[in-house]
Amino acid sequence: MRGLLLIALILLSLPARASEIVGALSQNRVSLTANFSGSEILIFGAIRRTADEVTIQEADEAAGSEDFDVIVVIEGPRQAVEVWRKERRAGIWMNVDSVGMASVPSFYAVASTQPLNQILSPEADEAFRISARQAIRAEQVGDGSPETLLFAEALMRIRERSAQYLSLERFVHIDRDILFRTNVRLPSNLTEGAYTTRMYLVQDGQVVSQFRTAIFVRKDGIERWLHELAYDQPFVYGLLALVIALIAGWGASALFRIIRQQ
């Protein structure tokens, strides 16, 4: 809460300009360790209004209306994806067709004050690529035909079930028409890299201001050491894996011998 009040005071002290949004994160670094089970990120900020808009806002409040909405997007590192379709042939399910996508977000979360289709116009969504469907660009999916677009829909469903793609409607809360906040839970199966965080101020279906920051996710501890060893010194990594396998096999054999003797 102190962070929210500090941002609000900074905005109020700035010279008058068009309405704008500014935000911050409870943490901008996430460490992937052996016992990592996910992480909850608090995203917060403030809306700065001009003097004229404050007067209009007071009139709107008397009428019981709100004129601004906030959308928060967290996008994970992009990666190439191959989506396969299965069919039953001769009594066996097998992969029969596939579509490759060159750049798809590994994680995508959209949190908003209201359902996205109620506060954002299709034109603004397409221009800023806010929704997950816009993030998976149609021109990437094969030749863009209706049949190949089904693969993009299938990918969306798969990643929604695994909590990699999240639609968090009414998860952004605005206090006193100035301060906003939301919590987004990052799953345990995160990809290492920079997670772009975008905050949009929306009015009458259009984006009037945006703010960007990032969350950096990286392996830490022994996981980081093993990752770097595998890429920097693959021969040593292979020998280490072989030694560990031999020790584990010898230990299991010795344990069985002890159990038999008892």
Image (cartoon, rainbow, N blue to C red):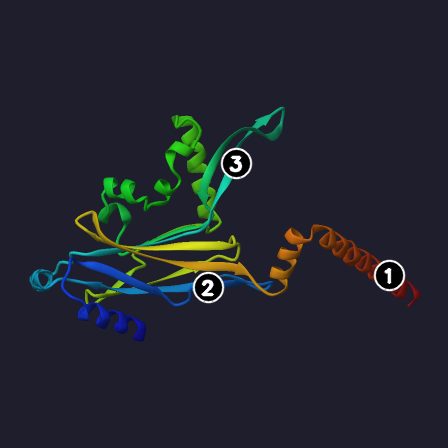
- The quarter of the picture where the C terminus appears is bottom right
Q: Give the residue at mark 3.
A: 82
Query: At 26% from the left edge and 69% from the top edge, which residue is drawn?
Result: 7
Q: Give the residue at mark 2.
A: 29
Q: Give the residue at mark 1.
A: 256
Query: At 15% from the left edge and 62% from the top edge, which residue is drawn?
Result: 49
Outermost residue, right side: 261
Q: Tally the marks.
A: 3
Residue mark closest to the camera, 3 vs 2: 2
Q: Amino acid at mark 3?
A: Glu
**Whole-Å distance between the Cαs marked 3 and 2?**
29 Å
Q: Amino acid at mark 1?
A: Phe
Outermost residue, top side: 90
Query: At 48% from the left edge and 57% from the top edge, which residue is drawn?
Result: 187
Q: Closer to the camera, 249 or 143?
A: 143
Mark 1 lies on a secondary structure that is: helix
Label 2 vs 1, first from the N-terminus: 2
Label 1 vs 3, first from the N-terminus: 3
In this orientation, does residue 1 appear?
no
**Whole-Å distance between the Cαs marked 2 and 1?**
45 Å
> Residue 68 appears at what percent x and percent y?
19, 56
